[in-house]
Image (cartoon, rainbow, N blue to C red):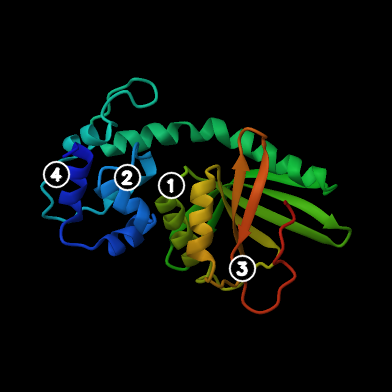
Amino acid sequence: MPKVVEKTLKIKGNRSQKLLAKIWGYSESRVSQLLSGKAGSIELDFAQAIWDSREEDCEVTEGEFLEAFGYAKNFGDNQIYESAQEIVNHHLENLDSKNLNIRNILQNALLAKKYPILEIATNYFLKNNIDEKISMDFFIKTQTTESQNIELAFKFLPNSIFEVKDFFKSLFASLYTMNSNFPSMRYSAVISDRKVFKTLRGVYGNVTVDNYISVILIDDKRQAIADEFIMPTKGESNFTESILT
């Protein structure tokens, strides 16, 4: 039995494939392929989801898991990683350099629509009434008409379904515990993986929100916005359509 299947079955325990498909954020067919040894290579996001789902009595060690999935060595730059957290840290180190590039792509999308850029700032903070903060990486204030300015706050995230979900949990908590809403403010998570984008659209397709909240898909090769999924808003709103795509 391949080590990947062996370790995954131990982490799976007595839980059903259907349940784990929901927990991991992947289709039942993909989970079935994994457990039968027919899945081929397993992407980092999937491996991280499997590891995060382990139960307290799981006998699989982190080192065994990383070795089985091929992430204990030769990960990206031939560096050896001793823990899953080191892999995540390595993944996050690239975000700062990408932020500027992502900001330029979003700014150019606005300029292409003839929207003047009024202001760009980094570290836009949201704070709720239980004193928790989340930091959006940057916001861009633009003018869509002579009488209307719109502020767009962006959070650039690794291509991880779970990190995007965690971000939205914090965002929802901040927006819906504030004393007032700001209808001209738009909040977006930015990713560059089409598969993750598609999954998130499925997850949040029936979630209605008060504010404009979206997931933006960036095409790194074309250096452009590929798509944007906007969560359905409650009632009628003048801010339910993208001004980027």
Asked if disc 1 and disc 2 are in contact, CB closer than 8 Å, the reply is: yes
Q: Tell me the amino acid under the disc marked 2.
A: Gln
Mark closest to the chain's N terminus, 4 or 1: 4
| Mark 1 or mark 3, earlier in chain | 1
Closer to the camera: disc 1 or disc 3?
1
C-alpha separation, residue under disc 1 versus residue under disc 2 = 9 Å
Res 121 seen here: yes
- The local crowd at label 2, few if under 14, some if 14 to 19, many if 20 or more residues have their Cα within 10 Å, is some
Residue that carries the numbered disc 2 in the rendered image: 48
- Pointer 1: what residue? 160
* Spatial separation of the CA atoms under disc 1 and disc 3: 23 Å
SS at mark 3? loop
Label 2 close to label 3 by CB (< 8 Å): no
Q: Quadrant of the N terminus?
A: top left
Locate residue 141, reporting x and y percent. 73, 51
Left or right of 47: which side holds 233?
A: right
Which of the two residues, 158 or 16, is positioned nearer the viewer here? 16
**In the picture, residue 182 is in which quadrant?**
bottom right
Disc 3 marks which amino acid?
Asn
Q: For this rendering, which residue is in front, 20 or 121?
A: 20
Residue marked by disc 4: 60
Disc 3 target residue:
211
Crowding at dot 1, Cα within 10 Å, few <14 / some 14-19 / many 20+, comes out as some
**Closer to the N terminus: mark 3 or mark 4?**
4
Contact flag, marks 4 and 1 (Cβ < 8 Å): no
Earlier in the chain: of badge 1 and badge 2, it is 2
Q: Position of residue 23 (x, y in %)?
A: 32, 59
Question: Residue furthest toward the right?
Answer: 146
Q: Decide: few, some or many residues near mark 4? Use Cα within 10 Å; few <14, some 14-19, many ≥20.
A: some
